[in-house]
Image (cartoon, rainbow, N blue to C red):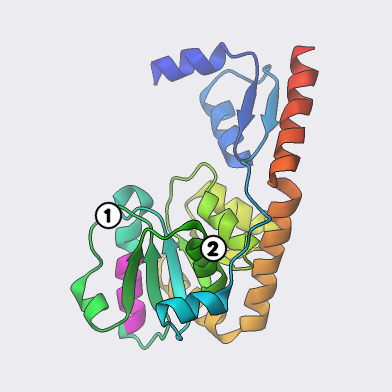
Amino acid sequence: MTLYRQLIEQSHGLMFYSPAERRLANRLYRVENRPQLWLGGGIETAAVGDATRFRAKFNFSEPFLLYAGRRDATKNTPLLIDYFRQYRAEGGTLRLVTIGGPGPALPVDLTASGAAIDLGFLDQQDKLDAYAAATALCQPSRNESFSVVLMEAWVNGTPGLVHSDCDVTREFCELSGGGLHFRHYGEFAAALHWLSENPEQAAQMGGAGGQYVRRNFAWDVVIARMLAFLHATWN
């Protein structure tokens, strides 16, 4: 990390995706006297999905848990698969839908039974429609700096389910009221049961997430915040 240390500690100013990322940088490097901004990331908030259109196009009537992105150990998807398999074995009714990639194929025992399906890469509108139709978006990664997919799900009114060990996504859920988090299987299963059994509260949670994104990460908000920081720092 020597090169990163030199680069960061010699910078004139620093902008961060999240409060947790800012805390990490200040813990690792001597940057307490550098101008700093929690900027966040820009999210498209105007375009939204249509749940009915998704269900009609993909012939999908059952409620489902959505995962969006590549499937590999760095995203903690093996844990998601293991937990979901146990959830279904214990009588859980949600299906698992994965979109995006790349990654290994979903396990045959889950796909053959219809418990899980991979739709692969979708076009932009189909992706938004998938967000809108999902009961929740699961983001199991422990190593996120922001998580665009979580923000996109919130824009579409869908609550998030994230890993407790990821400071970034857990804190976003806590700040927004837009999601739940889990550390072990019992919490994962309990969250899925609660989301399934309390659709009105889950919708309110997703709506709170959407309001949070629009207040903080709409493109015009992020650009205005960045420009104000640049003017204040370099003028």
Asked whether residue 182 appears in the rendered view, the answer is no
Q: Earlier in the sequence, mark 1 or mark 2?
A: 1
Q: Identify residue for label 1.
A: 103
Residue 90 to residue 78: above or below: below
Q: Secondary structure at mark 2?
A: helix
Q: Observer-nearest residue: 136 or 87? A: 136
Residue type at mark 1?
Gly
> Considering the image in quadrants, where does the N terminus appear?
top left
Kindly identify which residue carries mark 2: 128
Would you place residue 155 above or below residue 232 in this image?
A: below
Q: Measured along the vertical axis of the image, is residue 230 above or below residue 51?
A: above
Looking at the image, residue 72 sits to the left or right of residue 22; the answer is left
- What secondary structure prevails in the magenta region? helix
Residue shown at 34% from the left, 86% from the top: 90
Instruction: Give me the residue at 61% from left, 58% from top.
Output: 173
What distance separates the C-alpha of mark 1 from that of mark 2?
A: 21 Å
Q: x, y percentage for residue 28?
A: 51, 26
